Image: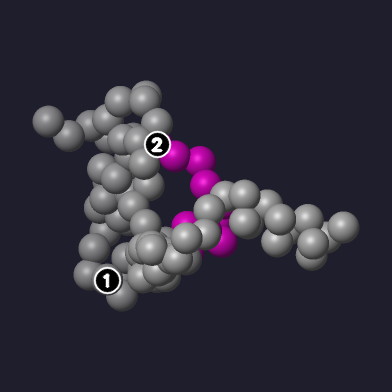
Amino acid sequence: MQTKLTLRIDDGLIDRAKSHARKSGKSVSQLVADYLALLPESTRRQPRPLTPVVASLRGVLAGSGLDEEDYRRYLEDKHL
């Protein structure tokens, strides 16, 4: 079942949304629905997906022998 929803949004933002919707071949309603579908279903905080840059760095220091204490010392040396 679909239900109509009224939103109050700044005119400039509406223009940007319409322009983006046209370029992507979707309606503004579909853009909003796609965004809302990404929201977690529960109120429990769910982990965010990693950005491509962060994902590429994951595991880089594995086996290096460095730990949180090493990082703490580095920050102290840098800022104190």
* Residue drawn at the location 53% of the way across and 53% of the way down: 67
* Residue 52 seen in this snapshot: yes
> Residue at the bottom extreme?
23
Q: Quadrant of residue 77?
A: bottom right
| Badge number at residue 6 | 2
Q: Position of residue 46 (x, y in %)?
A: 35, 36
What residue is shown at x 23% (from left), y 32% (from top)?
3
Most distant residue in the right direction: 80
Q: How is the image coloured?
A: one colour
Residue furthest out toward the left: 1
Whether residue 12 is in magenta: the answer is yes
The x, y position of residue 20, in whole percent, is: 37, 69
Q: Point out the image quarter for the N terminus.
A: top left
- Which residue type does callout 2 highlight? Thr
- Is residue 29 something that shows in the picture? no
Decide which of 19, 72 is in the foreground and name it.
Answer: 72
Magenta residues span 6-15
Residue placed under numbered mark 1 in the picture: 24
SS under mark 1: helix
Q: Would you identify the image quadrant in which residue 7 lies?
A: top left
Q: Is residue 57 left or right of residue 24?
A: right
**Location of residue 69 in the rendering, given as x and y in whole percent from the top left corner:** 62, 49
Q: Is residue 54 magenta?
A: no
